Amino acid sequence: MKLSKLTDYAVVLLSVLATTQKGPQSAANLATDTGIPAPTVAKLMKLLGRNGIVSSTRGTSGGYALSGKPEGISIADIIGAVEGPIALTACVEESEDLCAVESTCGVAGNWESVNAAVRLALQSVSLNEMAPDWRKMFKDKANG
């Protein structure tokens, strides 16, 4: 299992929002602060907004902010928002596409157990735990 760059970028962007405490941040400011291309930031912020992880405010002092506390946002929430439901195999996906051997498969139920364990592990790690101390990085940037 490998997560996409978009999920990695989403964690970085949300970490900045969680630690900088500068109020709502524009997509342009987030792009500058993180080095993530502005179109990618805009795309991710819209996606995270649709999934309730960030909220947006219009206007000159508007931008994006976390919808809740970083402790209440899990890595599973972020992955789900960017990648879709967490499913390691097709037999645990919520999909209409059925596996060709589903009727004779003896391991499908076991995959659900594995998937549940992975989901639980990802739900137990919060954004707060993942967020590095961006304040120090920004301070070093300003002084350097």
Image (cartoon, helix red, strand yellow):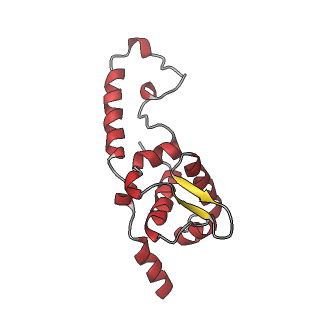
**Left-right relation of 81 to 111:** right
Which residue occupies 46% across, 57% down? 11
Which residue occupies 63% across, 63% down? 38
Q: Quadrant of the N terminus?
A: top left
> Whole-percent x and y of residue 73?
42, 51
> Whole-percent x and y of residue 125?
34, 51
Residue 137 shows in this picture: yes
Which residue ends up furthest to the top in the rendered image?
Answer: 103
**Left-right relation of 117 to 143:** left
Which residue occupies 48% across, 42% down? 80
**Quadrant in the picture for residue 140:** bottom left
Which residue ends up furthest to the right in the rendered image?
Answer: 59
**Left-right relation of 81 to 107:** right
Residue 40 versus residue 90 in the image, above or below: below
> Whole-percent x and y of residue 29?
59, 70
Which residue occupies 47% across, 87% down? 143
| Front residue of this view, candidates 65 and 122 | 65
Residue 3 shows in this picture: no
> Whole-percent x and y of residue 92?
42, 27
| Front residue of this view, candidates 2 and 33 | 33
Total tally of numbered discs in the picture? 0
Residue 89 versus residue 48 in the image, above or below: above
